[in-house]
Structure formats: structure tokens, C-alpha cells
Amino acid sequence: MRRIKILPSFLIVLAGVLALFPVLYLFANSFMSGAEILSRYGREITEANAGDFSSHGIHFVRFGLIPEQPSLEQYRLLLFHSPGYLRMFWNSVLLVAPVLAGQCILAPMAAYGLENIRWKYKEALYFAYIIVMLMPTQITLVPNFVVAGWLNIRESYLAIILPAMFHPLGVFLLRQQLKNFPKECMEAAFLDGAGPWQAYRSIVRPNLTSVVAAMLVLLFADNWNIIDQAVVFLKELYDYPLSVYLGQAVQGDPGTFFAVSVFYLIPSLLVFLLGQDYLTEGIALSSVKA
């Protein structure tokens, strides 16, 4: 029996190690110079050494997580001698921040209207929300591109920000939470003379904090990693976000590429670490039917 109980724990630990290994590999290689990375992984396969590669496999490269000569030079070059990196980092911030701010305001109000206000065709609209949420981003790019042309906002951040501000994920999570919200509280507020807006502001919105925080964590990860939208709508190189810059950084110094990847990963890690409790609680609240 004890062996049976140990096996699931071992499998969970093994899965965790395998999941964390790419992150450890990324951080370790970011402290290696470009020359060391090339000496470890950049050996060219020729006719002379092809036999060694086929017989030794992965031992053909000097794989390891500990740098021989740890260096911060690539970080210094990135921060003080790569203005393009800093520009694209702030481009990512400028794209993500308005989306999260807009979702904080719009998603709770939309969910409240769909759940607590009676009006015709609201379930049909909610069904349309679900359909759009399940669609891949590539499918919605074409209509978004057409609408952006009508609004004359192509080649601007608004073409990316506006559709993302109305992403239906937040409305879906928040409405599921409102289904569990006690109807007696709303009825008591209306009996005391409160209108729909006052009831929302004073009673409903304060009780959605955990789900809103969970929504922000998920939406941050989604919008921080955008590539397709940026490539379609933005034409100038220095308007691209950092997610697009990664594809160009790989063509340069390998040490700098790993440093860029670390900086790209840090905001997502911080947001997850700060919001993991809210994420767990918010997802649980939005999935349990009272």
C-alpha cells in the first residue's frame, strides 16, 4: 500500500522537474557568454565528425547547467547598449496595461448585466460570447483587420488593444461567479431603494475581487505573449512588442538571446507568483455552482 501511495507522488515530482527544467536551462545559459554557448552547443556537423555524432548522440555537445565562467556581460549589453530591447519591452507594457485596465472596468459590468438585469436576447448574446471565446485568434484577425480599417486605426496599438479589452474570457468567469451570488442580497438592496448601478457598485463589485484578479493573471499571460496581432497590425520594427523581438534576438549573440528570454519571462513569473492565490480561488469560485 505504501508503495502505491509513493508512486503518484513520485510521478508528480517528476512532472514538476520536467516542467521546470526549461526554465532552469534558460536561466543557467543566460549567465554564459556567447562564446561559451557556441563552444557547448554550436559544433558544426561535418563529414569528419558525423560518425562521432551518430555514435555519441547528445554527448556530442557539452550539455550542462553550470557556466564555466559565469558572466553578466550579456545583461549589461542588453540593458545599456540595446535601445531596441528597451523600446520593445515598454511596447509590451503599453499594449498590456490598457487591456487589463479596460477588462477591470468592462468585464464585471458586462457580466452583471448578463446575469442580473432582465432583457431580451441576453442568453443569445452570451452564447455568442462563448463562441468567440472558443475561436482561435487567427480566425478573428480577419474581421478585426477589416473593422480596424473602417476605424482608421490600422498600424496603431488601438487595433490590438480594443479587441483585447472586450475579450469574452473575463465575462465568462465573472458571470459564472455571479450565478453563485446570493439573490437575497440583491433583492434586499432593491427593497432599500438601490438602483441597478448602486447595487453593482456597493454589493456586487466588491465580491468579485478574487475572480477579477484571476482574470487579470490569465489575460496578462495571453496578451504579453501576442505575436500574430502585432505582426498583422504593426508595420514599424520599433513598434513591435518584446514577444516579436525574441524571434530577431535568436539571430544575434546567443548569450544575449538567453538574457532577453529571461527578461521576457520575469514579468509573467511575477504576475503568477503575486496572483496565484487569487487565481486558484477565482477559478474555484467561478466553477462551483451553489
Image (cartoon, grey):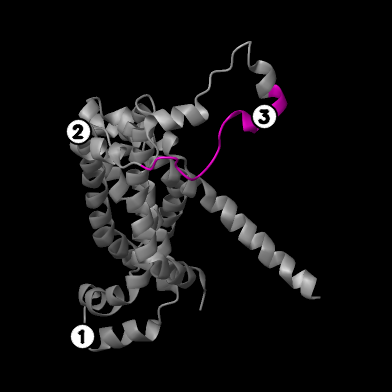
Query: Who comes first in sequence, dot 2 or dot 3?
Result: 3
Residue 81, numbered label: 2
| Any part of residue 273 in sight | yes
Give 243 or 258, whichever is nearer the viewer.
258
Q: Nearer the viewer, residue 235 or 56?
A: 56
Mark 1 crowd level (few <14, some 14–19, many ≥20, 10 Å Cα): few
The reply to whether the magenta stretch includes residue 59 is yes
Q: Amino acid at mark 2?
A: His
Identify the residue position indicated by label 3 in the image: 57
What is the x, y in percent for residue 241? 28, 37
- Residue drawn at x 25%, y 33% as measured from the top left: 148
For the residues marked 1 and 2, what is the alpha-carbon distance in whole angstroms?
A: 62 Å
Horizontal relation, residue 225 to residue 12: left or right: left
Residue on which the image places disc 1: 193
56 with respect to 109 (left or right): right
The amino acid type, in three-letter code, at marker 3 is Gly
- Secondary structure under tag 3 reads helix
| In contact (CB < 8 Å): disc 3 and disc 1 | no
